[in-house]
């Protein structure tokens, strides 16, 4: 998709949708900078409580809009947005709206890859996925962060 096509697609949206897409883009850029440039130990302590799980939310429309905007914007970035970047951006957006959420980190090994370790991050509100749903069931949760 070329830049002109993206601009035309954004212009066809309502002002509220444009604001959501702009917020999503800014959060994905911030997540990219954080993940690529700052050690995990410095920012992980701000992710939330490690012992709790978020409860279900009645704000299903908000969850759907944020999940859709993360997927739409991430697919148009000039770099590959990782599961961690997507989950962080969605977490920050939900935190701003006061929606409790849980960020999960999981790992798995793959026998065919010589016992290599693979990692994945995903974000849920209650049992509803907001980011990182694909393949999450294949991973064992090693840590979770719940906020607010």
Image (cartoon, helix red, strand yellow):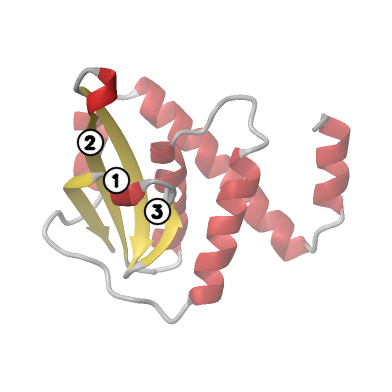
> Which badge, 2 or 3, comes first in the chain's sequence?
3
6 and 99: which one is in front? 6
- Residue at 32%, 70% in the rendered image: 126
Q: Secondary structure at mark 1?
A: helix
Residue underneath mark 2: 108
For discs 2 and 3, the disc positioned in front in the rendered view: 2
Q: Would you say residue 39 is visible in this rendering?
A: no
How many C-alpha atoms fall within 10 Å of the one at disc 3: few (<14), some, or many (≥20)?
Answer: many
- Residue at 88%, 34% in the rendered image: 4
Q: Is residue 57 left or right of residue 143?
A: right
Q: Are marks 1 and 2 in contact (CB under 8 Å)?
A: yes
How many C-alpha atoms fall within 10 Å of the one at disc 1: few (<14), some, or many (≥20)?
Answer: few
Q: Would you say residue 22 is visible in this rendering?
A: yes
Q: Is residue 70 left or right of residue 3?
A: left
Would you place residue 60 above or below residue 96 in this image?
A: below
Q: Secondary structure at mark 3?
A: helix
> Which badge, 1 or 2, comes first in the chain's sequence?
2
Image spot of residue 19 (x, y percent): 68, 56
Residue underneath mark 3: 91
Distance (Cα) linking label 2 and label 3: 23 Å
- Residue at 39%, 69% in the rendered image: 98
Would you place residue 100 above or below residue 50 in this image?
A: below
The count of marks equals 3
Disc marking residue 119? none
């Amino acid at each position: 998709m070329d830049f002109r096509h993206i601009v035309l697609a954004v212009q066809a949206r309502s002002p509220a949708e444009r604001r959501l897409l702009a917020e999503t883009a800014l959060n994905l850029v911030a997540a990219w900078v954080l993940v690529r440039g700052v050690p995990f130990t410095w920012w992980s302590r701000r992710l939330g409580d490690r012992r709790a799980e978020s409860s279900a939310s009645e704000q299903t429309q908000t969850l759907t809009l944020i999940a859709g905007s993360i997927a739409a914007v991430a697919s148009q970035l000039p770099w590959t947005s990782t599961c961690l970047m997507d989950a962080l951006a969605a977490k920050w957006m939900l935190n701003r709206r006061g929606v409790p959420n849980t960020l999960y980190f999981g790992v798995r090994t793959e026998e065919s890859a010589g016992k290599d370790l693979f990692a994945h991050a995903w974000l849920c509100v209650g049992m509803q996925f907001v980011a990182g749903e694909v393949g999450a069931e294949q991973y064992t949760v090693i840590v979770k962060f719940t906020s607010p």
